Image (cartoon, grey):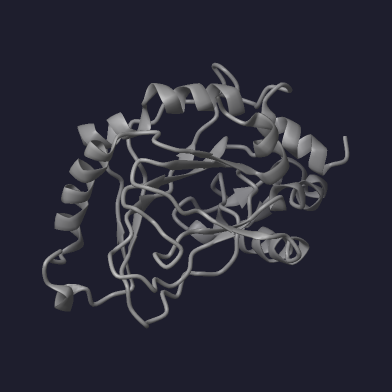
Amino acid sequence: MTDVDSFVADGFVWVAGAFSRRLAAECREILWRDTGCDPGDRSTWTRPVVRLGDYAQEPFRAAANTPELHAAFDAIVGAGAWRPRGSLGTFPVRFPGAEAPGDDGWHIDASFPGDDPSDFMSYRVNVASKGRALLMLFLFSDVGEDDAPTRVRAGSHLDVPPILEPAGDDGLAFMDIAGKAVQASEERPVVLATGQAGDVYLCHPFLVHAAQPHHGTEPRFMAQPPLAPAGPLPESSPVRIAIDRGLGR
């Protein structure tokens, strides 16, 4: 049973065993090959992060569409209010080492294109969360505290709606909302998205989060796809309820 109250209050829920460890292993085998690194030769692990593109092979589609996840989507976004995923987005594969990754700043993810769809920095966020129902963190390897788990500021999703509301439907560009959201949420407690391969964190689109350096021993494999809404979020959607709570409604 998905803890909807916790999602509204904290901005995320942890779905343990959302897909099988067997599927996670099948996906890791594909991902290892595409990193260009050798899992048995640490001398090939030369970069702190390797970004891999969208993956739509069968094990990835199966991992994204388990009955457990679909039930959680219904509970958090609303039945019929989300679009099934046919792939699993980008994978920032993080390797252990002392080198800074260079992408570990606090932010929220942008959701829809601005004037130039080819320019990521022009992507925007509005108070209705146009284009994004959830941020999702799919763990394809075991992730402990030293294994570069994503950092999240619990409750920070409630700080964002008052920043976005004055901007109306156009919303704010990625860099504008990132700076304001980070400042507004700096007192929030930090939680680490740790877990086992097959676990998934379902996060509110406005949750402030960040990567971090990898201080462990084995690479961390994680996907971070959005869940797209089927249309405007219904008033009964916990995602929408949390936005309204942030606006004091």
Residue 132 at what x, y percent from top left? 56, 38
Give the quarter of the image for residue 38: bottom left
Q: Quadrant of the C terminus?
A: top right
Q: Nearer the viewer, residue 246 or 8?
A: 8
* 89 sits left or right of 70 in the view: left
Q: Nearer the viewer, residue 69 or 57?
A: 69
Residue 72 at what x, y percent from top left? 52, 27
Residue 98 at what x, y percent from top left? 37, 83
* 166 sits left or right of 226 in the view: right
Which residue sits at x=59%, y=23%?
75
Which residue sits at x=42%, y=65%?
148
Picture layout, residue 84 above or below residue 116:
above
Outermost top residue: 80
Q: Quadrant of the N terminus?
A: top right
Outermost bottom residue: 98
* 147 sits left or right of 244 in the view: left
Residue 89 at what x, y percent from top left? 37, 45
Camera sees residue 238: yes
Give the quarter of the image for residue 151: bottom right
Camera sees residue 132: no
